[in-house]
Every structure is written in C-alpha cells, then in structure tokens.
Amino acid sequence: MVDCDPQRTTSDWIHARNNNPDLPSINCVQLYGKIRNDLLSLEQHYDFVIVDCGGQDNLALRATMSVASHVLMPLRPKRRDLKTVSHMDDIVATCMMINPKMQASFVITQCPSLPNQANRILEAKDVCRTYDINVLDAITYSRNIYDDSEESGLSVIEIEPKGKAADEMRGITCEMLQAKNATEIRNRIATIHMNKMNSMRGEYESSRSQEKLYAV
C-alpha cells in the first residue's frame, strides 16, 4: 500500500496491523509529489498496489491516475462532497489522455441508515451520473465497525466476515473489478500470482506480463 495522504490514516492502520504478530503483514510506504516512477517501480515487485491519495487534488493524485488501472473516488451524500464532483471529472478527463485504459468510478460512502434519508443517497448518485464517470450501485453505510477496524489494524471482513460491512466491501470490490463474486476475485488473484511466478522462472515475458491493479 502507498500512503500519499498527509493525515497518514493508512500508515497508522498498517502500523497497528503490523504490530500484531497474529495478522498477515502488509507493506506500506509513504510517497508524495511526483510519484509516477515510484509507482511503476513498485508495480514490478507486487501483484497489487493500492494507493491512498486522500481527498485533495495534488501531484500525487494525478501521478497515480496516470498509471492506475482502477480509480475509486468515495463521496459522502453531502453537498460539500458533491461540489467536488465537477473538479474530479476534469482531473479524470485530463488523466485519461495519458492513461486511456483507466477505469474510474464514484462510490457513495458513509450513508445514513435511516429510511427517510434514502433520497439523499439517490440524489447523490444522480449528481454523479451527470458526468461521464461510472457510479457504483454498491454503497457503504455509516457503521461503528469501520472505526473499530481502523483502530485495530483489521479489515471489516476480518472482524466480522459475514457482517453487513463485509458485504458492502465485497459488493464494491466485485462491482469495481466487474466480478460476479468474491470467489472469482480470489481466482483472479491466484492466476495473477501464478503468472508472476512463471514469469520469474522465465516462462513468460517479463514486461507487464500480469495485470496490476491500483485503486485510489
């Protein structure tokens, strides 16, 4: 994972996780500014590179979009978040000229769970759909488990595998990667890893022989 957010939320989560010997560790680096070449270098060593760019337009965000296969832009169903949609559309359009294969999507997150607030979610999606960027059907609701997972270094899937938050994460991932279910994604990961191992043995070409995924 690459943390480009000055708030260091991802780095703190990784630090908490890696301090727990019972959990699989995750490598994390902090990068800022013109990081395109750094990301391309990481791409050669990892099957997946996930980048947290935070919520501000900066060099790191644009550099990431210039090499990313997938970009996920979370928005809360609030006016101040939705005001940024136009600007994000401009950034995506600019980066698409450099990286035309990038698949960008908006996702509505931290939604209120009260039934009388459902229109807020629908209206937020409608605002996003006025632009030429995909809007995921999957959403997340405001749940305490997300805060709990952040403090413990765990994912919501690890804390409560059959819980609602875990289902939300699986839904977002499957829709973003256009997979039918989590099993299909696991099979893809296994295939990518196998291809990489074969490539290291010289059975495949070494230049970008396996799919690499980035997410913002």
Image (cartoon, rainbow, N blue to C red):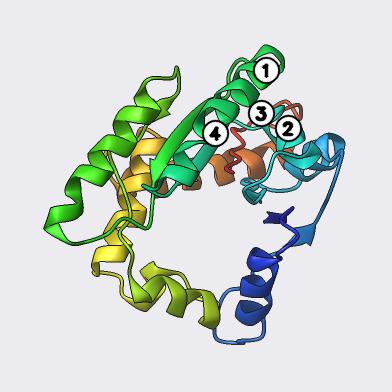
Marks 3 and 2 sit apart, C-alpha to C-alpha, by 25 Å
Name the kind of residue labelled 1 in the image. Answer: Thr
Name the mark nearer the viewer: 4 or 3: 4
Name the mark nearer the viewer: 4 or 2: 2
Say whether marks 3 and 2 touch (CB < 8 Å): no
Identify the residue at image location x=65%, y=41%.
196
Residue 40 at x, y percent in the picture: 79, 36
Say whether marks 2 and 1 touch (CB < 8 Å): yes
Judging by the rendered image, the residue that carries numbered circle 1 is 94
In depth, the one of 93 and 179 nearer the eye is: 93
Identify the residue at image location x=66%, y=85%.
19
**Helix, strand or loop at mark 4:** strand
Above or below 7: residue 84? above
**Helix, strand or loop at mark 1:** helix
Q: Quadrant of residue 28?
A: bottom right
| Label 3, residues with CA under 10 Å away: few <14, some 14-19, many ≥20 | some
In depth, the one of 61 and 80 nearer the eye is: 80
Name the kind of residue labelled 2 in the image. Answer: Arg
Marks 1 and 4 sit apart, C-alpha to C-alpha, by 15 Å
Above or below 102: residue 51? below
Marks 2 and 1 sit apart, C-alpha to C-alpha, by 9 Å
Identify the residue at image location x=45%, y=23%.
133
Q: Earlier in the sequence, mark 4 or mark 2?
A: 2
- Compared across the picture, whether 115 is left or right of 37 comes to left
Judging by the rendered image, the residue that carries numbered circle 4 is 70
Judging by the rendered image, the residue that carries numbered circle 3 is 209
Judging by the rendered image, the residue that carries numbered circle 2 is 62
Q: Earlier in the sequence, mark 2 or mark 1?
A: 2
Above or below 199: residue 111? below
Say whether marks 1 and 3 touch (CB < 8 Å): no
**Helix, strand or loop at mark 2:** helix
